[in-house]
Image (cartoon, rainbow, N blue to C red):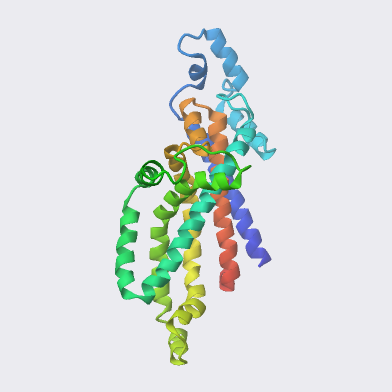
Amino acid sequence: MRSFLLRRVLLALATLWLASSLVFLFLLFLPGDPVQAILGLEASPAARQALERALGLDKPPWERYADWLTRTLRLDLGESIRYGKPVGELLEERLSLTLGLVLLGLGGALFLALPLALLALRFPFWDLALTGLMALLQSVPTFFLGVVLLYALAVHLPLFPASGFPGFSSPWEALRHLFLPALTLALSRAAILFRMARGSLLEVMGQDYIRTARAKGISEGWVLLKHALRPASLPLITVLGLEGGFLLTGAVVVEVVFALPGMGSLALTALEARDYPLLQGLVLVMAALIVLFNLLVDLLYGLLDPRVAYA
């Protein structure tokens, strides 16, 4: 198990290094000039050169990459051009909101998908209705679903706040503000988890040990919960890891719809201002979180199925 853990951690670090290097490379080809974005079109050549030296943009790309990689290893992500503050400080301010939203969305999707998949297998009528409903949810774009929920539950029926976030100092108000965005993410991803859970359960229900359990007179509901749920959860865990990454990027769109001050609005501002240090920091942190999600899934998969650890 230790060698499995070591292999997965080394692979995660290599993936993170490759992703961060590709981000740096792609930003070199990003159209737009950050110096012009700050000084405007009427800036003098002397002012432009002074700002380029201050930002390190006058150095060759390989030297800038070496500087950036060295600083990143020291957990120094540089200073934002747009805000004039350390990138790490800006990310720390916004990360808790985005991460809380993603975890609520992922938990909500799992909370909806798993019981509904069990219900669909237990009752054929619900199977048809739920499969149709999930297919509909899967076909609706996330931003449109967010707008529909916003109008229905915040404008037409003012049950939840439509925008803004008061901070985590007041947990109840924070949950009220995050409910609609998290519900948007949960509904958009519950369809995929439902289909995966239903398919896995159908496959497991055809196994010999399930027939043996039924032959002993165990009720169908108990067979589902005790004998079928655990082996059917292995493929679901793999999908959860992938969905965690998708929710992280999908949260950017949802934050814009509900005007939440998370990493989504920060990314849009950084892109508009050609704020390269902030963009690099944002993508690096998001890549690190996605790698972390997948690492946790690998470790959990190895714990639930020891054959994976020795493969």
Give the x, y percent position of residue 308.
56, 69
- Considering every residue shown, the one lying at the far right of the view is 74
User: 300 or 89, which lies in front?
Assistant: 89
Please tell me in which quadrant of the rendered image residue 157 appears. Answer: top left
Residue 310 visible in the snapshot: no
**Residue drawn 36% across and 47% down?**
145
- Considering every residue shown, the one lying at the far bottom of the view is 216
User: 300 or 177, which lies in front?
Assistant: 177
The correct choice, above or below, for 280 with respect to 98 in the image is above
The correct choice, above or below, for 154 with respect to 68 in the image is below
Q: Quadrant of the C terminus?
A: bottom right
Position of 7 compared to 132: left or right?
Answer: right
Position of 9 compared to 223: left or right?
Answer: right
Q: Quadrant of the N terminus?
A: bottom right
Give the x, y percent position of residue 140.
32, 50
Position of 74 compared to 101: left or right?
Answer: right
User: 284 or 265, which lies in front?
Assistant: 265
**Residue drawn 51% across and 49% down?**
102
**Residue drawn 57% across and 18% down?**
52
